[in-house]
Image (cartoon, helix red, strand yellow):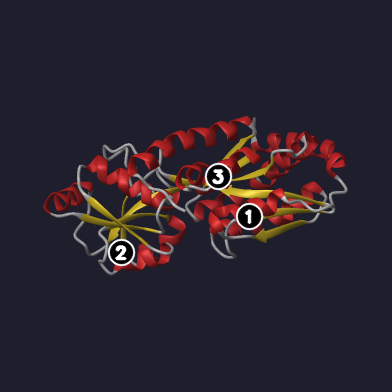
Amino acid sequence: MSTTSLRMLLGVLLMCLIPLTAGAGSINLVLPFPPAGAVDQLARDLEKPLARYLGEPVVVLNKPGAGGMVAIRATLTQRAGEQSFLMAHTGLLSLNPFLFRSVDQRMAAKQLRPVTLLAQAPLLLLVRADSGLTSLEDLRAVGKQRRLRYGSAGIGTVAHLAGAQFAHDLGVEADHIPYRGAIQALTDLVGGEVDFMFELLVGSSPLLSDGRLRALAVAADSRLAQVEQVPTLAELGQPLVFSSWFGVVAPRNASEQDIAAMQAALALAMEGDGMRSQLAGKGMVVDLRAGLDFENFIQAQSQFYGPMIQRLGIQLD
């Protein structure tokens, strides 16, 4: 089916469902992130199209804190005249239930219902441009001489897990150096304090463009259009896939009509003019999976990361 035909079909479906969701007063799209950043921008890009397709005001609410629990509670605590949906991500539903001792974190996934997966952002393997490291073999050679150091935006992040698994598969010893955010980690990578790290294109692009960092590989099934010259890890003999995903979920007790209307509206908005190219520029790939397909995807991600977290012995309070 062509994109035009798909949009027409979704449009017809949505028009049928709007009367069932009318009267909500407003629709909240809750983010477990502070303002600014790629996901915040994605949500704000969706704000107007969703309001247009759903026929109700859509408000983006930033609710960072407590490992995503502030945002989850805000989503589950709906006031009269409001509907709330949550912009979920890898950490929230596929990592946190294994990372945190808190029962709340483990129960969060059971209180939320997957609506639509929107996009994935593969991680890049980065080194300092003037480090002399130009291949995986170079990294392995250094790792045979001494322990490597790799940075990440924090303990238990996808980048942390990617670095640990990569070092294991490369056959070298490596120490994890966690930072309070990707910017600090990237700064120390440029400064030579760490040997390598995994990070999203959206955060590392300026340092790649000005020649301070080099991307050795992308942890994805296929190359990224914005850095097409960078091979995948699989092409280099190390088939690892690590990405951050973003999608919309709802309270488990949300009605079938509300879920269906939001799914149709999200599909139309994501297929809107320019959205795919905008996301591609940030190193994100549109990946629309709704309902059960999204739920199965989350479960598969949990089955991938859960044993890895347990093997590494990572646990947070």
Q: Is residue 103 left or right of residue 12?
A: left
In the rendered image, residue 268, in percent from the top left (x then y), is placed at 70, 43
Q: Is residue 179 left or right of residue 52?
A: left
Is residue 112 among what the camera can see? no
Q: Which residue is mark 2?
A: 189
Q: Secondary structure at mark 2?
A: helix
Q: Secondary structure at mark 1?
A: helix
**Mark closest to the chain's N terminus, 1 or 3:** 1
**Mark closest to the chain's N terminus, 3 or 2:** 3
In the rendered image, residue 12, in percent from the top left (x then y), is placed at 80, 36
Q: Is residue 238 left or right of residue 179?
A: left
Q: Secondary structure at mark 3?
A: helix
Image point (32%, 67%), residue name: 188
In the rendered image, residue 121, in percent from the top left (x then y), is placed at 48, 48
Alpha carbon of mark 3 to alpha carbon of mark 2: how far?
36 Å
Image point (59%, 59%), residue name: 40
Q: Which residue is mark 1?
A: 71
Q: Choose top left, top right, bottom left or bottom right for residue 43.
A: bottom right
**Mark closest to the chain's N terminus, 1 or 2:** 1
Is residue 220 among what the camera can see? yes
